[in-house]
């Protein structure tokens, strides 16, 4: 057996195919989003609503699809959800404000361990960090990059994405992008929403009595809790192109 | 003259012409694998992939710190003639510890890992205390043998996904270790008022430094995953210091004592080995099956002529099954496994100086291959897991024992190993 050839083949295979793996980088917490308003739900723990459609024997976890986008995968299982989170979710999803606590906070809220509460950001970072992991450098294809945490509030696919807060400014590009993303969601429907969207959708309709336009919904939202502006959310990952003698031997079996 | 003759007899009894066979067993890596009887090549999803299948690292997109401890008790029951003796060796040690880091990736996965482990164990025990008659002489024989030690690995591994669902990986290890062996033989012959009494205490202290290289390939789908591992021959330089203390007395002469110490240098080799497995993940069960093989040494030393009677010239195979069950509504998994592996009389071969490698099996017979059953439980949260595993394994060997033309007996040795291993893993 020619070891050199085997090792060489292995290395060649790795070199020529290794480019399949595309590395990214992480923006550490503290780097702030510009043009974003961040809100906190002063209701504290009351914000930790969980309307996840949690069917018995079914698990939903965040994974990545083939393009690296986050994908909420639901499937029947007797395994505890934490096990999938422990063994399957990439660790950098945990650092992402938008992916980590989908089971604790509504969409557009993220869980802040410092205050132990869900905080709100009307900016949906994945729409603004081009090339970010899971996100979106897709323009109108934003829907692919939007993780559907909306199991708590609002329809993932509907334009009710801002109702987690109060009446919001409509002028920022962020909103536009987000809206596009949700519109796309609504029409295209990434498969990962299959459960979340249904629940969220029904809520939106109940709350706003609207399924249509974004503006109308924003204006008509009546939120029982009044969030206040506090700080910027943690930013998610961003793609980075850089990759990285007498006896000649002892009497071994002398026991016998 | 008679004394010389007796010394010659003693040497014949207490040593062997080949002295090449050692009984070495694998300790594995990590409690999770251990709870599934080490059928883990197709299921590795933690730091232990650095040992079982480095390619599986590419699918472990985690930052993990893991440390494992194990407590083991090796029991040896020796049978010779009408005698049965039991001996035991207990151990408590850090089985492995290490870090795994996966680089953030938008697609695929790239993970590196560094680990300390001690996957190869030299522990062996045997004890004989028997009286028999070689007409017209009465013989009392009291022998004990004990060796401990093993090989430790400092490993660096890398796994990378090279295509959707497919990863490859490699682990390079610096291998070091030690061995501490001591054998005591007390032989008494008596015939009326005449007697011959000898005691020999023989010890070896060995040190090992070498390397280990293993490659892996891994396929992972939602329900099915498959893994391959290929291990290149390990190589280690060995230095051994032996010490032989002998005391002889008989009914005619004053006691004679002598002591000999020698230093030896050798090269230690293993053969190619590999494993392949497949696992299936169902909503209520994960099951993993694995096959293993150690290649004949003719692949490593093509120019050597290995006798057909030697086990070193044949494939040694093994395999097993591991299962994992979730406990509904609780963050708990239960695991169990079974493995059977052919006892390898030549796990390593040694080349001392310019001597040729001794390929003989030293008249050993394998009466029962190694069976292992194990079970374990893991408690986990979203960022931490605690594995507790227990395993029981057993194997039996024997050797024909001849004393001149007068005695032809069989020494039989039954081994059993109880081991508890626990691993704590933190993902952050």
Image (cartoon, coloured by chain):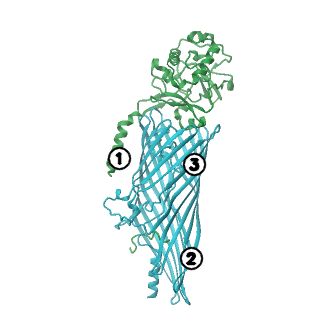
Please tell me the numbered disc located at residue B336. Answer: 3
Indicate the secondary structure of the residue bearing disc 2. Answer: strand
- Looking at the rendering, in which quadrant would you find the C terminus of chain B? top right
Indicate the secondary structure of the residue bearing disc 1. Answer: helix
Residue A174 can be seen, yes or no: no
* Discs 2 and 3 lie in a common subunit: yes
Taking depth in this image into account, of B360 and B115 the one nearest to the observer is B360
**Residue A89 vertical position relative to residue A220 in the rendered view, above or below:** below
Q: CA distance from mark 2 to mark 3?
A: 41 Å
Q: CA distance from mark 1 to mark 2?
A: 54 Å
Mark 2 or mark 3, earlier in chain: 2
* Residue at the image point whose x is 45% and y is 75% from the top: B260
Q: Which residue is mark 1?
A: A7
**Residue A211 vertical position relative to residue A132 in the rendered view, above or below:** above
Structural crowding at the residue carrying mark 2, measured as other residues with C-alpha within 10 Å and reported as few (<14), some (14–19) or many (≥20)? some
Residue B342 can be seen, yes or no: yes
Taking depth in this image into account, of B174 and B389 the one nearest to the observer is B389
Q: Position of residue B356 (x, y in %)?
A: 35, 66
Q: What chain is tagged by disc 3?
A: B
- Chain A hue? green
Q: Which residue is mark 2?
A: B130
Q: What chain is tagged by disc 1?
A: A
- Chain B hue? cyan
Q: Position of residue A177 (x, y in %)?
A: 50, 16
Indicate the secondary structure of the residue bearing disc 3. Answer: strand
Q: Position of residue A34 (x, y in %)?
A: 52, 20
Q: Position of residue B61 (x, y in %)?
A: 50, 37
* Residue at the image point whose x is 58% and y is 24% from the top: A196
């Amino acid at each position: 057996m020619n070891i050199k050839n085997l090792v060489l083949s292995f290395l060649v295979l790795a070199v020529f195919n290794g480019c399949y793996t595309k590395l990214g980088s992480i923006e550490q917490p503290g780097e702030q989003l510009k043009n974003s308003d961040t809100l906190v739900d002063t209701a504290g723990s009351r914000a930790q609503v969980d309307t996840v459609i949690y069917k018995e024997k079914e698990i939903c976890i965040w994974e990545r699809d083939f393009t690296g986008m986050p994908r909420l995968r639901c499937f029947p299982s007797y395994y505890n959800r934490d096990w999938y989170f422990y063994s399957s979710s990439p660790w950098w999803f945990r650092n992402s404000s938008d992916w980590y606590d989908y089971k604790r906070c509504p969409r557009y809220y993220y869980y802040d361990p410092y205050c132990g509460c869900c905080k709100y950001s009307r900016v949906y970072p994945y729409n603004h960090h081009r090339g970010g992991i899971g996100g979106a450098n897709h323009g109108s294809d934003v829907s692919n990059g939007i993780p559907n945490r909306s199991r708590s509030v609002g329809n993932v696919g509907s334009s009710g994405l801002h109702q987690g807060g109060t009446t919001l400014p409509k002028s920022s590009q962020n909103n536009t992008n987000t809206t596009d993303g949700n519109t796309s969601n609504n029409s295209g429907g990434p498969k990962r929403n299959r459960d979340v969207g249904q629940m969220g959708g029904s809520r939106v309709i109940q709350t706003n009595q609207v399924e249509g336009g974004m503006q109308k919904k924003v204006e008509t939202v009546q939120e029982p809790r009044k969030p206040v502006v506090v700080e910027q959310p943690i930013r998610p990952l961003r793609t980075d192109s850089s990759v990285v003698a007498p006896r000649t031997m002892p009497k071994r079996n002398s026991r016998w | 003259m008679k004394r010389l003759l007796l010394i010659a007899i003693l040497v014949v009894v207490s040593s062997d012409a080949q002295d090449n066979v050692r009984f070495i067993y694998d300790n594995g890596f990590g409690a999770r694998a251990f709870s599934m009887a080490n059928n883990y090549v197709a299921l590795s999803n933690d730091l232990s992939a650095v040992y079982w299948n480095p390619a599986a690292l590419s699918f472990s997109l985690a930052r993990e710190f893991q440390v494992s401890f194990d407590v083991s008790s090796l029991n040896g029951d020796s049978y010779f003639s009408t005698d049965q003796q039991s001996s035991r060796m207990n151990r408590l040690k850090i089985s492995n510890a290490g870090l795994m880091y996966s680089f953030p990736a938008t697609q695929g996965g790239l993970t590196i890992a560094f680990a300390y482990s001690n996957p190869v164990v030299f522990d062996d025990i045997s004890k004989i205390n028997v009286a028999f008659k070689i007409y017209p002489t009465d013989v009392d024989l009291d022998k004990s043998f004990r060796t401990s030690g093993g090989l430790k690995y400092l490993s660096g591994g890398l796994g990378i996904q090279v295509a959707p669902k497919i990863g490859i990986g490699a682990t390079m290890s610096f291998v070091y270790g030690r061995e501490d062996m001591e054998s005591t033989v007390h032989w008494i012959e008596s015939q009326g008022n005449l007697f011959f009494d000898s005691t020999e205490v023989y010890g070896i202290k060995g040190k090992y430094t070498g390397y280990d290289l293993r490659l892996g390939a891994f396929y992972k789908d939602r329900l099915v995953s498959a893994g391959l591992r290929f291990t290149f021959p390990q190589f280690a330089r060995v230095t051994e210091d032996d010490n032989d203390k002998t005391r002889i007395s008989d009914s005619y002469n004053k006691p004679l004592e002598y002591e000999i110490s020698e230093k030896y240098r050798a090269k230690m080799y293993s053969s190619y080995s590999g494993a392949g497995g497949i696992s299936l993940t169902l909503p209520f069960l994960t099951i993993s099956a694995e096959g293993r093989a150690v290649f004949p040494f003719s692949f490593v030393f093509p120019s050597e002529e290995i006798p057909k009677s030697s086990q070193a010239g044949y494939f040694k195979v093994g395999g097993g099954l591991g299962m994992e069950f979730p406990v509904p509504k609780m963050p708990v998994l239960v695991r169990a496994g079974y493995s059977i592996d052919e006892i390898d009389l030549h796990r390593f071969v040694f080349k001392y100086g310019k001597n040729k490698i001794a390929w003989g099996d030293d008249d050993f017979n394998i009466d029962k291959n190694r069976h292992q059953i194990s079970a374990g439980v893991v408690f986990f949260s979203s960022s931490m897991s605690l594995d507790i595993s227990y395993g029981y394994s057993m194997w039996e060997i024997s050797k024909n024992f001849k004393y001149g033309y007068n005695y032809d007996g069989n020494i039989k040795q039954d081994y059993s190993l109880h081991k508890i291993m626990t691993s704590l893993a933190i993902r952050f």
